[in-house]
Image (cartoon, rainbow, N blue to C red):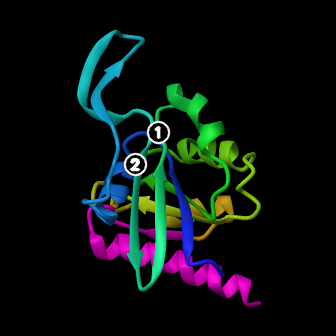
Amino acid sequence: MDNKIKVLVAGPFNSGKTTFIRTANREAYDGVEVSNFDPEEIKELSGTTTIGLDISHINLNGVDFVLVGLPGQKRFSFLWDTLGSDYDAILLLHSAELPLSETEFYVDFFSKTPSWDKAKKLILLTKRDINPGFNVEKLSKFNLPVLSCDPRSSEDVNGVLMFLYNAMKYSFNT
């Protein structure tokens, strides 16, 4: 098995994608964030949004991970077809504060990309602290493994990446 793993990080706006990628390796992080703007209402909103993509890399235990994060707002979906292909793993982040329909949209979209069949897929449940009562079993409808992750925690982020590596290693050896 190759020790270089390309990971697509996708999901709804404000689910923690940029934070996950930046936490993996702050020194290697490269991305563009701008003030959040509502094009329909023509007004600036609080916070920032990713335009283009986020990218970082990290070496954990001799395994190189390349992380590529897509903007989560549907208005940037024209990028997803191009950037959403040829990955070894796909992480779909779901914020506990969002309805399942948001993640369903992303599962549906990325299940049609060339990477879907070959990639290890994982749903990361984020923002459990905002909604501690979120029923994790609801995510089982997607038939994908689910891990809870605080994208601000290096330990959680590294744990997710090593989980992916071990899942891939196990799959290739069976």
Label 1 close to label 2 by CB (< 8 Å): yes
Residue 102: x and y in percent read 54, 42
Amino acid type, mark 2: Ser
Amino acid type, mark 1: Gly
Residue 128: x and y in percent read 34, 61
Say which of 40 and 174 sits in front. Answer: 174
Q: Which residue is at 33% across, 61% downward?
A: 151
Residue 72's mark?
1
Residue 102: tell me if it is visible.
yes
- Give the structural element (helix, strand or loop) at label 2: loop
Residue 103: x and y in percent read 56, 47
Which residue appears farthest toward the left when viewing the image?
A: 46
Magenta-tinted stretch: 146-174
When asked about the image quadrant of residue 148, the answer is bottom left
Note whether 107 is above or below 170 in the view shown: above
Neighbour tally class for label 2: few under 14, some 14-19, many 20 plus, Cα within 10 Å: many
Q: Which residue is at 36% across, 10% downward?
A: 41
Note whether 76 is above or below 137 in the view shown: above
- Give the structural element (helix, strand or loop) at label 1: loop
Magenta stretch, main secondary structure class: helix
Asked whether 152 falls inside the magenta stretch, the response is yes
Residue 127: tell me if it is visible.
no
Residue 73: x and y in percent read 47, 32
